[in-house]
Image: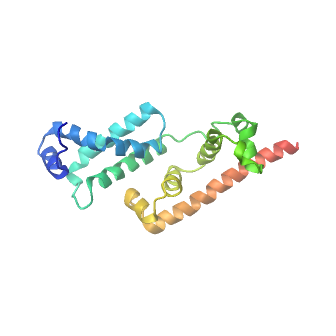
C-alpha cells in the first residue's frame, strides 16, 4: 500500500496543476465529507451528488485555502454550506405527509406515558415532519447543536455566523420546533375528542 502523502505537499502539487493528486485528496477526505452530508441527506444518489459538489467547490476555491486551519476544517465548512444550500433549494411542501399517515402508534408518542412502544423510525418521522416547519438555517443549527453536540463557536466556524447569531437562531429554532410538535399534538388530541 502506497503511503499517504503529506497534505501540505499534496495541496501544493494540486495548486501547481497536478489534477491527479486531487483524486488522492478526495480519497483522504471522502469519509469526512460523506459523514457530514449524511446528517442532512439520506438518499444515496443525492448524497453522492452533494459530495461531488463539495469537492468541486473545494477544487475551485483551493486558492483561498490559506493553511491557518487544517484542510479538513476548511473542507468541512464547504460541506456544511453545500448541505445548507441543498436544504434551501429543497424547500418541502409544508404538509407533505399528513399526520394521519404516520399511524396511530406514532402519535401516541405525543401524549402517552409509555413511549417505549414507539419505534425509533416512527419518532424520527414525527421529528422530520416537525422539522419541515423550520427554515433551512433553523434545521441546520438544530442539527449541529442538538444532534451533533457542537458548540456555538464551532457552529459559527462552520457557518460564518457570529456566536450571538448562532444562539439566537438556535433559540428561535427550538421554540419553533416545540410549537410545531405541540400543534401536531393538539391537532391529534382534538381529533380524538371528536
Farthest top residue? 45
Quadrant in the picture for residue 175 = bottom right
**Would you place residue 153 above or below residue 37 in this image?**
below
Relative horizontal placement of residue 96, taking residue 40 as reference (left or right):
right
Farthest bottom residue? 164
**Would you place residue 190 above or below residue 144 in this image?**
above
Q: State which quarter of the image contains the N terminus.
A: top left
Relative horizontal placement of residue 189, taking residue 74 as reference (left or right):
right
Farthest right residue? 194
**How many numbered circles are shown?**
0
Say how the picture is coloured.
rainbow
Q: Position of residue 129 (x, y in %)?
A: 63, 43
Using the image as rendered, state which of residue 115 and residue 71 is in the foreground. Answer: 115
Q: Residue at x 47, y 65 (%)?
A: 165
Relative horizontal placement of residue 91, taking residue 120 as reference (left or right):
left
Q: Residue at x 58, y 61 (%)?
A: 172
Q: State which quarter of the image contains the C terminus.
A: top right
Using the image as rendered, state which of residue 191 and residue 3 is in the foreground. Answer: 3
Q: Position of residue 29 (x, y in %)?
A: 30, 44
Q: Residue at x 54, y 50 (%)?
A: 135
Q: Position of residue 144 (x, y in %)?
A: 48, 55
Q: Position of residue 96 (x, y in %)?
A: 63, 36
Q: Residue at x 22, y 39 (%)?
A: 24
Quadrant in the picture for residue 60 = top left
**Would you place residue 153 above or below residue 48 in this image?**
below
Amino acid at each position: 500500500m502506497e503511503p499517504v502523502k503529506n497534505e501540505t505537499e499534496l495541496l501544493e502539487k494540486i495548486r501547481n496543476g497536478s489534477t491527479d493528486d486531487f483524486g488522492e485528496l478526495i480519497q483522504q477526505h471522502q469519509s469526512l465529507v460523506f459523514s457530514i452530508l449524511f446528517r442532512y441527506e439520506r438518499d444515496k444518489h443525492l448524497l453522492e451528488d452533494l459530495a461531488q459538489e463539495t469537492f468541486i467547490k473545494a477544487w475551485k476555491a483551493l486558492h483561498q485555502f490559506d493553511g491557518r486551519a487544517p484542510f479538513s476544517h476548511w473542507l468541512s465548512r464547504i460541506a456544511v454550506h453545500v448541505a445548507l444550500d441543498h436544504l434551501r433549494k429543497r424547500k418541502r411542501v409544508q404538509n407533505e405527509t399528513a399526520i394521519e399517515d404516520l399511524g396511530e402508534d406514532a402519535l401516541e408518542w405525543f401524549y402517552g406515558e409509555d413511549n417505549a412502544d414507539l419505534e425509533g423510525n416512527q419518532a424520527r418521522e414525527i421529528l422530520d415532519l416537525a422539522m419541515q416547519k423550520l427554515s433551512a438555517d433553523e434545521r441546520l443549527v438544530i442539527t449541529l447543536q442538538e444532534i451533533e453536540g457542537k458548540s456555538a463557536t464551532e457552529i459559527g466556524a462552520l457557518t460564518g455566523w457570529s456566536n450571538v447569531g448562532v444562539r439566537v437562531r438556535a433559540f428561535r429554532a427550538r421554540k419553533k420546533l416545540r410549537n410545531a410538535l405541540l400543534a401536531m399534538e393538539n391537532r391529534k388530541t382534538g381529533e380524538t375528542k371528536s
